[in-house]
Image (cartoon, rainbow, N blue to C red):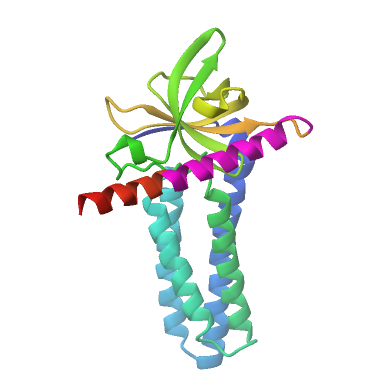
Amino acid sequence: MKLSLNYLKLKQEIDRHEVLTWGIFFFLFLGFFYEAMESGAWFTLILNVAFFTIYLTFLKKLLKRLFYSFWTFLGLLGFFIILKAFDQSLFSLSFFSFIASGFLVGLQAYSLWTPIFYPVVSWWEYDFRYRDDLKITVKKDEVSLEGRLTDLRRQAGCVALFKELALGEIITIEPFGELTNMQFKAEIMSRRKYSFGRPFNYGVKFILDENSDDAVFKSFVAFWKSERKLKQKKKFKSEETVI
């Protein structure tokens, strides 16, 4: 997979995740430290600090390359922290430290759950009739390109195109079908290329005018969600018919 990010525009976001990762480690360390003070298990403290230093370093590498396996390791970390927190005495210093660490894990997950960093593509669905995407036209200067919107979350989306576009470019997205009267400006923030013969996946940020575009965009999001539900219903009906 080839990955490109608009680091200039995303620098603040990337720096925030760097701080969050160190914050998770800091509160984890405090939790283990207070736990060792209560139990006297100092050797266990050393082992835990050594293990999670390696673990979080590996997690940072996965995040830097935006591998999807990052979510597996982040989920395991969050699950461990929750178990660890409720294994402590209620309202103890170790309890609050683990809770703070778990909160930062949740904050990092929420911040990263966007098509700019991790687009959701329904690769497991081979039948295009039931895929979670929408046919669109992408306009750049005087050129019109056919593409698909494969993800739409938090004022960002993932656009699949077979043409390579530069990071930072402003494009116009026009949905097909019932929404041909709508068009939205968007900036390309990230670009993924999984393999030869497959389209580029662009993480885009929609540029909305609060006075005019916001209400229209909300209608578009509502249409997107309704289309997904409709496709799921059609798929289940089709499977029941086959059975």
Q: In the figure, 48 relative to 104: above or below?
A: below
User: Which residue lies most toward the front here?
Assistant: 241
- Residue 67 visible from this viewpoint: no
Q: What residue sits 37% from the left and 40% below the top?
A: 131
- Residue 9 visible from this viewpoint: yes
Q: Quadrant of the C terminus?
A: bottom left
Q: Nearer the viewer, residue 124 or 171?
A: 124
Q: What residue sits 48% from the left and 41% below the top?
A: 227
**Residue 55 location (% of width, % of height):** 41, 62
Q: Nearer the viewer, residue 53 or 140?
A: 140
User: Which residue lies most toward the top here?
Assistant: 142
Q: Quadrant of the N terminus?
A: top left
**Residue 210 location (% of width, % of height):** 76, 34
Residue 23 is covered by the magenta coloring? no
Residue 216 is covered by the magenta coloring? yes
Residue stretch rendered in magenta on the structure? 211-230
User: Which residue lies most toward the right here?
Assistant: 211
What secondary structure do most residues of the magenta stretch adopt? helix
Q: What residue sits 52% from the left and 50% below the top?
A: 113
Q: In the figure, 90 relative to 105: above or below?
A: below
